[in-house]
Image: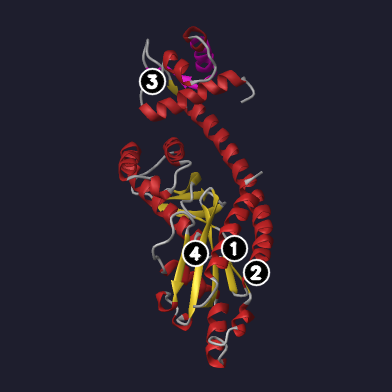
Amino acid sequence: MADLDDRKRKILKAIIQTYLETGEPVGSRTISKYTDLNLSSATIRNEMSDLEELGYIVQPHTSAGRIPSDMGYRLYVDELMREKEQEVSEIKEMMIEKTDRMEKVLKQVVKILASNTNYATMITGPTYHHTKVKFIQLSKVNEEQLLAVIVTEGNLVKNQIVALEEPIDDEQILKLNLLLNTQLNGLTIEEISLGMITKLKEQAGVHSSVISTVLDGLAEVISDGEEEVPVYTSGANNIFKYPELSDSSRASELISAFEEKQLLVDMIKDTVPESDEKTGIQVYIGSEGPISTMKDCSVVTASYDLGEGMKGTIGIIGPKRMDYENVVDNLKTLKVQLDNIFKKP
């Protein structure tokens, strides 16, 4: 790397990325269109000659463009790995700091909401939806297996063993790493179309089964990362303020249901009635909700969106004669406040 200045590194990167996309030798005119160097084709040809002399690219045919050498691939992958490792490290630090801050804010929010409404309140911590691919790394375990390390947005990591149907050498592993990262980085699982998968498998050739296994692992890591949803609650004792709910057996059932955090999460997942498109607020009255012990209650929820796929839900549980106007006003205000706290730098 020390023998390459910034211009040569950018040109080499452009050659490799263009070759990965087209499979055809890359000429200076093509590079002049895709780089931000604003250099003439003649200047780029001189730089390409230097890169060839240094062993980073080769010219397969006379008068043809260049393609990366194994040495060029290796430099590109090492550089890519360093960039991604730094990204993952930065994301991890940011998420630890953000999660700690968010937990404190949400605990305070749910207490204020219970105080302002005199009802029982809950809020789920934001979870990642549409998690994006950050990095995929394949490395050889033995002659029959590869190890795939899959890193997604939010620093979710999965190690996946990939059984090999055909022998594979180091150069082929490098090319698969480049193929996967070039095509999948920054995409959500929903954005990886059937056509894209077919193209990836075609480009992988005899190692198409590696693509299938990696994509299965990617789906699993995203699914695993969305399983646990933190829930913060407050104001359970407010239930006793309302005669229709304060009967000892009924109140006991309500408190038990309210303290069962997973039940509250399932309630949010299982109820999909019509919601107000402008406010995102949903109202479940009595038996409309899925929890039988809350048939004498109304539950009002609102989703909040912190951007980058991070979403959560605020909920208020009270008698069917609750002050709906006050509840809706409080939820609308909280949605705006959460947006301001976490979206603004």
Is 65 drawn above or below residue 78 in the view shown?
above
Measured Cα–Cα span from mark 3 to mark 4: 46 Å
Q: Residue at x 54, y 75 (%)?
A: 322
Q: Identify the residue position indicated by label 4 in the image.
A: 227
Residue 174 x, y percent position in the rendering: 46, 37
First of labels 1, 4 by sequence position: 4
Q: Which marked residue is nearer to the observer: mark 1 or mark 4? A: 1
Residue 99 appears anywhere in the view: yes
Image-quadrant location for residue 233:
bottom right
Q: Is residue 250 above or below residue 56?
A: below
Check if mark 3's residue and mark 4's residue have beta carbons within 8 Å: no
Give the amino acid type for the residue marked by disc 1 in the picture: Asn
Q: Which of the pair 108/51 is nearer the observer?
A: 108
Q: Looking at the image, do the residues carrying marks 2 and 4 touch, with CB atoms under 8 Å apart?
A: no
Outermost top residue: 42
Residue placed under numbered mark 3 in the picture? 25
Q: At label 2, which amino acid type do we have?
A: Asn
Q: Name the residue carrying label 1.
A: 330
Is 248 colored magenta in this rendering?
Answer: no
Q: Please determine whether, in this image, residue 290 is positioned above or below residue 1.
A: below
Report the Cα–Cα distance between label 1 and label 4.
29 Å
Task: Report how far apart the C-alphas of labels 3 and 2 lie in the structure.
Answer: 68 Å
| Main SS category, magenta section | helix
Give the image location of residue 146, x and y in percent. 45, 49
Per the image, the residue denoted by label 2 is 116
Q: Which residues are magenta?
A: 45-60
Quarter that holds the N terminus:
top right
